[in-house]
Image (spheres, rainbow, N blue to C red):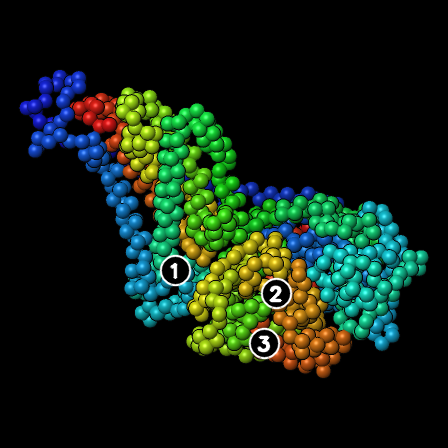
């Protein structure tokens, strides 16, 4: 960002000025910490590039109905086992009598079977990829939202009240953390997929997407709640909390008006990384049959189908796998970039090594 | 800049690592784990060795009184010998009934109502206990007390049905004499298939100390050449030579094969890709289930004649529809489904391993006459559903996890959705599938996949257990459509009492048509199975019996 050479105190080579005044923009207004973070993020080229990639992926999966209706003319679960494609003078079978599905057609058949057929059931792989992406992203983002919300609540309660509330919450989280999370989620996923879930007023059918979302949310909570609890414990020691209490603020007000805003940057970073983690979790569960149930597709279930045909049509496993890779990679790099942009201490260290000049203490 | 470089390096490493892993995984060592045995026998094969084999699922029960699946019968065929048995041969020859633990085929008298047999003397179980005539009565009672799925076959024995219902009072229709070894069975009326049914494992004699409960984890002592020494449901089991076979039973039953291998170790490997890879690499010697559709063409091309053999079967693959509640209680809806299901598509789903049919009896079964009642017509099917306007459009479709039955279930669900139904697909573990859909208290049993392989070459075997109203059981049910048509039930019972001649075959063909007009099922094909062994096994010696599958006694190392 621009540093007004006339207003800044003189800075020697290799050193940094102690506690300079906040920088001024062109209009002379003071810039808040969010704007500074945004500027820092923007400077991080890889993070911006991957953020754009992530949005492109989201647009890609949201365009599923458009592609299905106008280009492929089929739904994601429709079988075309006996269909034949007429490409020029050639007649190609979508599934051969020996059971081999057709390979990628690109635009030769007018966009139908762009990436080929997905299995002996002759479904359009491209359409399934897009709808599957919707499911994967929905499960990933949905469960990340629930996890983050639960983690904030638990972290705030544990960190603010301390005492027995903290003990109960922290120890429960410890127990959850110590369990082999994936194995239990697998077992739960398989058993609930059959019978559905009936807990008092909540009734979920076996094939409902809520089941993998809830399972993944529950088991990811400890990973987010503990760091948040740690931060809250630190924050409650600070003077501004003491001041708020002295002014007569009740616990809820202190938690939501004083502490929560200071958690914002941590929460944002964790949220992004949790989406990535949960998408991988869902892919793993679905691959093993414990997550999304057929005939719905998610990228994980598509890898299951592709694995069977690895010897004859390897693309069927590689394509969904690559989508998962790109999405998770983008989210991780964006998450890292966000952390660098929002966390001042880390940034200062980086700045010092790079020899760049940046006013300290300008962010939170 | 550094972040981007790091990302690129990570992706590059991951790509290299995955390529390396794939390359390594393909060529692991192909040492055969089967231990060598004694010097070669006259037949050209080697005697001895331990057979290492895999099944894709654990049998429904490892208990002769209860098991009613191909996996279970293959697993126990050479362990539990009933009074009569089937010839250890393939095809039509393998459907011939011959004496087992009994000296000769039964003497039938009293207008077909009395069967008299004599137990061979000197027979022993694998724990040393002598086999007595009264053990047969015990085995029949135990089977009925356990509510076995095979029970309906034996209801014609005087007192058997009452015993099944009350579990008290014994079976007056069976009289035995342990001193002479005589077994006399009296039936309520003549039954043309009873000789065949005496050859099924449901009524194989067992020691009277055998607990009256499912003994899958601790199988009862054996009378055959091999005894099951260890059984871990869901994981695997082991066989060793029955010590009392060589000492006692072999001499009493000289025509029964003794077996070449010294024992076998069976592992359940649920991933059929892995099973095929393991056979190709020689890690395992035999896989009981056929190669999955995705590898079928490859295995056939590479190994036919040397390690792979295609076997025709007498079987029907079908989708059952629950006729007791909407929407399938309306015959028009069921007929519409038959118009909608296209067996040609399913032939491809099975990669050519099924041949399309659309009736109860399969080709090769006496009484089969080809029907074409419902030529494929999706538009007509949709019309019929609209006209019928069923009250319940929410249905649950059941299938099991074993490919390609799983894909067949998915295909079927797709067809039902096109017809306008709102469907939920339930894919059940193959180990438990038939137990679950055979339990009438399971919720939402609307429609689903099933198959049936002949127990013996008589059409009654398809009609009575699967389509007679009198065969509907609360648990271990086989009549999944729960069809109960009194006129048709009567016909089944009448024809079942007669011996099979040209008149009866024509009557069965007519019965086939009448049932297909009722359309409790949407049948779609008959299956070819296969034998796939590693290079260490002599392919020619392996015998596949139409009822019992691959005999353990027929495997030998080269």
Task: Please determine if labels 3 and 2 lie on a single subunit.
Answer: yes
Quarter residue A14 falls in: top left
Q: Chain of mark 3?
A: B
Task: Please determine if labels 1 and 3 lie on a single subunit.
Answer: no
Real-space Cα separation, disc 1 to disc 3, in angstroms = 34 Å
Residue B440 x %, y %? 62, 61
Residue B10 x %, y %? 35, 36
Question: Badge 2 is on which residue?
Answer: B480
Q: Chain of mark 2?
A: B
Decide: few, some or many residues near mark 2? Use Cα within 10 Å; few <14, some 14-19, many ≥20: many
Q: Secondary structure at mark 2?
A: loop
Task: Please determine if labels 1 and 2 lie on a single subunit.
Answer: no
Quarter residue A151 falls in: top left
Question: Badge 1 is on which residue?
Answer: A76
Front-most of residues A109 and A343: A343
Residue A351 vs A149, above or below: the answer is: above
What's the residue at 51%, 67% (across, down)? B347
Front-most of residues B371 and B67: B67
Question: Badge 3 is on which residue?
Answer: B518
Query: In the visual, does A283 lie left or right of B551?
Result: left
Is residue A146 visible in the rendered image? The answer is: yes
Is residue B453 visible in the rendered image? The answer is: no
Q: Chain of mark 1?
A: A
């Amino acid at each position: 960002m621009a540093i007004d050479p006339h207003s800044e105190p003189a800075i020697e080579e290799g050193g940094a000025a102690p506690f300079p005044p906040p920088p001024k923009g062109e209009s002379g207004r003071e810039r808040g910490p969010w704007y500074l973070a945004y500027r820092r993020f923007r400077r991080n080229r890889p993070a911006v590039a991957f953020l754009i990639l992530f949005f492109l992926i989201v647009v890609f999966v949201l365009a599923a109905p458009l592609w299905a209706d106008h280009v492929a003319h089929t739904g994601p679960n429709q079988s075309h086992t006996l269909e034949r494609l007429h490409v020029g003078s050639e007649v190609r079978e979508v599934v051969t009598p020996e059971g081999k599905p057709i390979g990628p057609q690109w635009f030769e058949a007018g966009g139908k079977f762009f990436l080929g057929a997905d299995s002996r059931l002759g479904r359009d792989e491209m359409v399934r990829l897009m709808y599957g992406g919707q499911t994967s992203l929905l499960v990933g983002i949905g469960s990340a939202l629930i996890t983050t919300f639960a983690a904030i609540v638990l972290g705030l309660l544990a960190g603010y009240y301390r005492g027995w509330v903290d003990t109960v919450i922290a120890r429960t989280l410890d127990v959850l953390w110590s369990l082999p999370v994936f194995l239990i989620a697998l077992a739960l996923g398989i058993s609930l997929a059959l019978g559905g879930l009936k807990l008092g007023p909540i009734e979920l059918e076996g094939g409902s997407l809520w089941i993998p979302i809830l399972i993944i949310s529950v088991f990811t909570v400890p990973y987010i709640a503990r760091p948040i609890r740690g931060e809250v414990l630190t924050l409650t020691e600070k003077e501004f909390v003491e001041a708020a209490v002295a002014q007569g603020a009740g616990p809820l007000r202190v938690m939501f008006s004083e502490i929560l805003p200071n958690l914002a940057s941590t929460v944002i970073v964790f949220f992004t990384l949790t989406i990535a983690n949960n998408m991988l979790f869902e892919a793993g569960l679905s691959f093993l049959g414990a997550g999304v149930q057929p005939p719905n597709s998610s990228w994980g279930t598509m890898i299951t189908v592709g694995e069977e045909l690895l010897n004859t049509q390897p693309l069927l496993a590689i394509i969904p796998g690559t989508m998962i890779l790109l999405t998770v990679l983008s989210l991780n790099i964006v998450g890292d970039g966000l952390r660098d942009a929002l966390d001042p201490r880390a940034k200062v260290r980086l700045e010092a090594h790079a020899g760049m000049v940046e006013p300290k203490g300008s962010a939170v | 800049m550094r972040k981007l470089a790091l990302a690129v390096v990570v992706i590059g490493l991951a790509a290299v690592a995955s390529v390396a892993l794939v390359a390594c995984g393909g060529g692991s060592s192909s040492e055969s784990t089967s231990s060598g045995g004694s010097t070669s026998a006259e037949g050209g094969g080697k005697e001895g060795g331990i057979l290492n084999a895999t099944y894709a699922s654990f049998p429904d029960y490892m208990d002769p009184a209860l098991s009613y699946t191909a996996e279970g019968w293959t697993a126990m065929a050479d362990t539990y010998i009933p009074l009569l048995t089937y010839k250890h041969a393939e095809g039509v020859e393998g459907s011939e009934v011959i004496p087992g633990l009994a000296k000769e085929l039964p003497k039938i008298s009293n207008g077909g109502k009395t069967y008299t047999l004599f137990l061979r003397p000197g027979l022993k179980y694998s724990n040393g206990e002598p086999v007595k005539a009264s053990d047969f009565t015990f085995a029949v009672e135990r089977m009925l007390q356990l509510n076995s799925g095979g029970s309906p076959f034996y209801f014609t024995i005087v007192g058997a049905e009452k015993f099944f219902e009350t579990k008290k009072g014994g079976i007056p229709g069976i009289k035995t004499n342990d001193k002479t070894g005589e077994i006399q069975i009296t039936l309520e009326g003549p039954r043309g298939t009873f000789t065949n049914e005496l050859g099924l494992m449901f009524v194989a004699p067992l020691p009277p100390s055998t607990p009256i409960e499912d003994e899958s984890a601790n199988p009862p002592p054996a009378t055959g050449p091999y005894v099951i020494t260890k059984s871990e449901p869901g994981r695997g089991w082991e066989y060793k030579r029955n010590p009392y076979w060589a000492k006692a039973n072999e001499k009493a039953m000289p025509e029964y094969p003794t077996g070449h291998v010294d024992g076998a170790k069976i592992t359940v490997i649920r991933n059929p890709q892995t099973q095929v890879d393991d056979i190709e690499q020689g890690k395992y010697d035999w896989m009981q289930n056929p190669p999955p559709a995705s590898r079928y063409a490859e295995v056939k091309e590479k190994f036919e004649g040397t390690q792979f053999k295609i076997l025709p079967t007498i079987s029907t693959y079908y989708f059952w529809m629950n006729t007791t509640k909407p929407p399938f209680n309306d015959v028009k809806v069921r007929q519409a489904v038959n118009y909608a299901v296209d067996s040609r598509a399913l032939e491809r789903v099975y990669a050519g391993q099924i041949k399309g049919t659309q009736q109860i009896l399969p080709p090769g079964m006496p009484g089969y006459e080809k029907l074409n009642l419902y030529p494929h017509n999706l538009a007509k099917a949709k019309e019929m559903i609209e006209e019928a306007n069923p009250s319940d459009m929410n249905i649950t479709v059941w299938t099991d996890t074993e490919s390609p039955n799983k894909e067949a279930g998915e295909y079927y669900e797709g067809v039902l959705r096109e017809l306008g139904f709102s469907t939920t697909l339930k894919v059940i573990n193959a180990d438990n599938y038939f137990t679950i859909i055979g339990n009438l208290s399971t919720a939402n049993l609307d429609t689903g996949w099933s198959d049936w392989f002949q127990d013996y070459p008589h059409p009654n075997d398809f009609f009575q257990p699967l389509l007679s109203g009198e065969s509907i059981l609360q648990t271990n049910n086989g009549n999944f459509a729960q069809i109960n048509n009194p006129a048709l039930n009567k016909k089944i019972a009448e024809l079942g009492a007669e011996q099979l001649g040209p008149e009866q075959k024509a009557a069965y063909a007519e019965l086939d048509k009448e049932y297909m007009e009722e359309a409790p099922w949407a049948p779609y094909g008959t299956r070819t199975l296969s034998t796939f062994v590693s290079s260490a096994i002599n392919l020619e010696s392996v015998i596949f019996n139409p009822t019992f599958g691959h005999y353990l006694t027929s495997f030998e190392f080269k």
